[in-house]
Amino acid sequence: MSGSSPTINDVARIAGVSKKTVSRVINRSPLLKEATREKVEKVIAELGYTPNPQARALALRRNFLLGLLHDNPNAQTVLNFQEGVLDAIRDTEFALVVRPVDRRSPDMLEDIRNFLEVQRLYGVLLLPPISENDELAELCRDMGCGYVRMGSAALDTSEHLVQSNDREVVESVIDYLVELGHRRIGLIEGPSGFRSAAERREGFRAAMKRHGLEVPETAVAQGNYRFDSGVEAANKLLQGDTQITALFASNDEMAAGAYHAAREKGIAVPGQLSIVGFDNSPIAAHIWPPMTTVSWPIREMAKSAALKLIDPGSDGAKPSTFPARLVTRDSVGPPPPTT
């Protein structure tokens, strides 16, 4: 081998195994005994053998690319998820392709099918709300493309799922506000068609009912997860229901919009109005006063989702549920005293 780089044939000969077995070790096949895997990996390390990515791609009939498919209006959510995937594939031969899609298009599934055929992806990561589309998951299965869905509830089996406990954690948000003395709590809910919006809404309503508190129509407004919709929704609530002393917004962008609406009306946060968001995005810590919010472990979820595709036997790939938690800051206080 002097003067030339070691080959897969060299590894197989020295390890006393077949070329196919070496290939299985390289491709992290679960169909191997651990002793065999360790023996081959030791020879690979001793020889300094480096697999050729192009040759591996041809053998597997797919590229070492993960696809991130989304139709999500919250750019920060997409960015946070992308960073988590990059954490998982750092120091590997994998790369990430980000592909926005239009969930309202009648051609969405066909467009994704064409994309998967052309790119020959190793696997895809599906963000809500398209992750909630069972036909899309079935398409991935039919094409033999690995996939993992992200959601706010159980959408699939554990190997194809990372989920948070949105409903449960929102109930804890309302419990916290009620303990402080709030009785009229407004809701800025997310857009229809998003399971996350539905789970957070149901958590809000369940907690309010448990505490014996009403949720009149004047205390609920819908947004679309964007800042401007939070401004509009908060204006509607604060004009239509003057008894509201606290607002829960289904994400931080809309909660920041509620800050803006309150300030325009001369309403002090939290002296006259407490505001809670959801996501724990950078805006929550940067806004003044710093925002109480729910920390959604999206980066950890994304890393696990990617590992479920590229290294399913690893510890990091095992979790499918990632509990969110309340982060208390300065945007919440007791309700103002009644006169």
Image: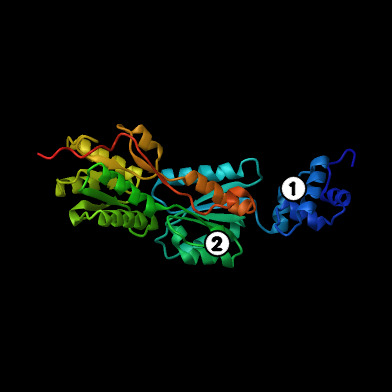
Considering only vertical position in the picture, is 20 above or below 269?
Answer: below
Give the percent coordinates (x, y) of residue 174. Answer: 29, 48
Mark 1 residue type:
Asn
Q: Quadrant of the N terminus?
A: top right
Secondary structure under tag 1 reads loop
Q: Quadrant of the C terminus?
A: top left
> Given this view, does label 1 or label 2 mark the residue nearer the observer?
1
Mark 2 residue type:
Asn
Front one among 306 and 76: 306
Residue 255, quarter of the rendered image: top left
| Mark 2 crowdedness (10 Å alpha carbons): few <14, some 14-19, many ≥20 | few
Give the percent coordinates (x, y) of residue 243. Answer: 15, 46
Determine which of the numbered discs, if any, sits on residue 114 in the image. 2
- Report the Cα–Cα distance between label 1 and label 2: 27 Å
Secondary structure under tag 2 reads helix
| Residue occupying the point 65% across, 44% down | 92
| Mark 1 crowdedness (10 Å alpha carbons): few <14, some 14-19, many ≥20 | few
Residue 272, quarter of the rendered image: top left
Determine which of the numbered discs, if any, sits on residue 52 in the image. 1
| Residue occupying the point 57% across, 58% down | 159
Front one among 44 and 74: 44
**Residue 115 visible from this viewpoint:** no
Disc 1 to disc 2: CB gap under 8 Å: no
| Residue occupying the point 42% across, 65% down | 106
Give the percent coordinates (x, y) of residue 231. Answer: 25, 44
Considering only vertical position in the picture, is 142 above or below 166?
Answer: below
Say whether disc 1 or disc 2 marks the residue closer to the N-terminus: 1
Position of residue 213 in the picture relative to residue 1 (left or right): left
Residue at the extreme left of the image, as rendered: 339
| Residue occupying the point 83% across, 41% down | 47
Give the percent coordinates (x, y) of residue 331. Answer: 29, 36
Front one among 57 and 293: 293
